[in-house]
Image (cartoon, coloured by chain):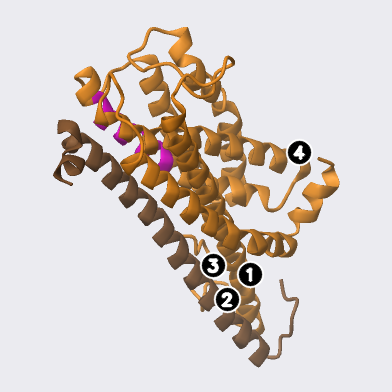
Chain colours: A brown, B orange
Amino acid sequence: MNAFFDMGGYAAFVWPSYAVTAVGLVFLIATTLLRQRRARTTLARLEAERDAAGLGHGQR
Amino acid sequence: MSTNVFHRYANPTKFIGLASAIIPFAWGLTILLGGYGLYLGLFNSPADYQQGETVRIMYVHVPAAWMALGCYTTMAIASAIAIIWKHAVADLIAEETAVIGATFTVLCLVTGSLWGQPMWGTWWVWDARLTSMLVLLFLYLGFMALKNAFDDPQRGTQAARLIALVGWINVPIIKYSVEWWNTLHQPAAVARLDGPTIHPDMLTPLLLMGGAYMTLFTALLLVRVRSHIMERRARSIALALAEARGAGPDEDPAGLRDGATP
C-alpha cells in the first residue's frame, strides 16, 4: 500500500494533480447545484407571490 | 440537422423538458465512467516504461485538455447558431459553457505543469503547445469579460459571440502545434490518423475518464442553462409584480433586476 502512495517516487506530482482536479471539479459541481437551488426557490416564491397578487400565469 | 430541430429547442420550456430528461443520465454516467476509469487508472494499469508512475497524471490531464478544446468548439458553434438562427437558448449555452471550459483549461495547465516538472525538468516553457493553451484560457476569460462589459447586455452578447467565433482558430492551432513546431510536449497518442499508439491497458482508463469528463460537462451545462432560464423567469415575474404594485422603476423587490447570475 505504501508503494501505491509513493507512486514510484513521484507522489509529489501525481497526487497534487488528482487533488487539484478534484478541487476544480467539486467547485464546479457545488456552485452549479447551489445556483440551481437558489434559482428554484426564488422562482417558486415569486410565482406564489404573483398568483397571490392575482396576476395569473403567462406574465412576461 | 434541419432548422426545425433548432427552433423546437429554441423554446426555453421545451429546452427545459429535454434537459431534465437528460440530466439524471448524465450524472449517472459520470459516476459510472469516472469510478471505473479512476479504478483502472490508479490501481489497474501499468506504469510507463519511460515516464514511470507519472503517466497516471495523463488520466486527469488529457481529458481536461480534450474538454478545454471541446468546450470552446461548443461555445463557437452555439454562438454561430445564435447569430444565424437567433436561437434564444444558444447564447445561454455559450455563456454557461465558457465557465466550465475555462475551469477545464486551468486544470489542464496545472496538471500539465505538475507532469512537466518531473519529466522535462521545468514547470513551464513558452513553446507552441503550452503557449497556445494559455491563449485559450485568455480567450475564455475575454469571452466572459466582454459578455459583462457593456451596460446594454445585447452589445455584450454580440461582442462575446464574435470572440467565440474568431478565437476558435486557436483550437486547430493547439491540436496541430505539436506537429507544426518543435515542442517539448509529446505528439498525439490517441487521435491519430494511423490509430492510437498507446497501449490498450492505458487507453481504456483514458477513454473512460474522457467519457466521464464529457458527461460531467453535459450535466453541468444543462443544469446551469436550466437555472439561467429559471432566473430569467423569476426576473420577469419580479418586474411584473413591481409594475402591478405601482412601484417606481428603481424598486427591485427580488433583487433580481440586473443579473441574478452569480
Task: Identify the residue position indicated by label 4 in the image.
Answer: B84
Q: How far across and down, in percent of the image, does residue B258 sit? A: 52, 62
What type is the residue that disc 3 sits on? Arg
- Observer-nearest residue: B128 or B115? B115
- Identify the mark at residue B257; answer none if there is no mark: 3
Q: CA distance from mark 1 to mark 3?
A: 11 Å
Q: How far across and down, in percent of the image, does residue B187 sit? A: 43, 16
Q: How far across and down, in percent of the image, does residue B239 sit? A: 62, 74
With A13 as the anchor, is B232 left or right in this view? right
For marks 4 and 1, the one nearer the N-term is 4
For marks 3 and 4, the one nearer the N-term is 4
The span picked out in magenta is B103-116
**Same chain? Circles 4 and 2:** no
What type is the residue that disc 4 sits on? Ile
The chain letter under disc 2 is A
Task: Identify the residue position indicated by label 2 in the image.
Answer: A43
Residue occupying image coordinates x 49% and y 54%? B32
What type is the residue that disc 1 sits on? Arg
Q: How far across and down, in percent of the image, does residue B128 sit? A: 39, 15
- Disc 4 is placed on an element classified as helix
For marks 1 and 3, the one nearer the N-term is 1
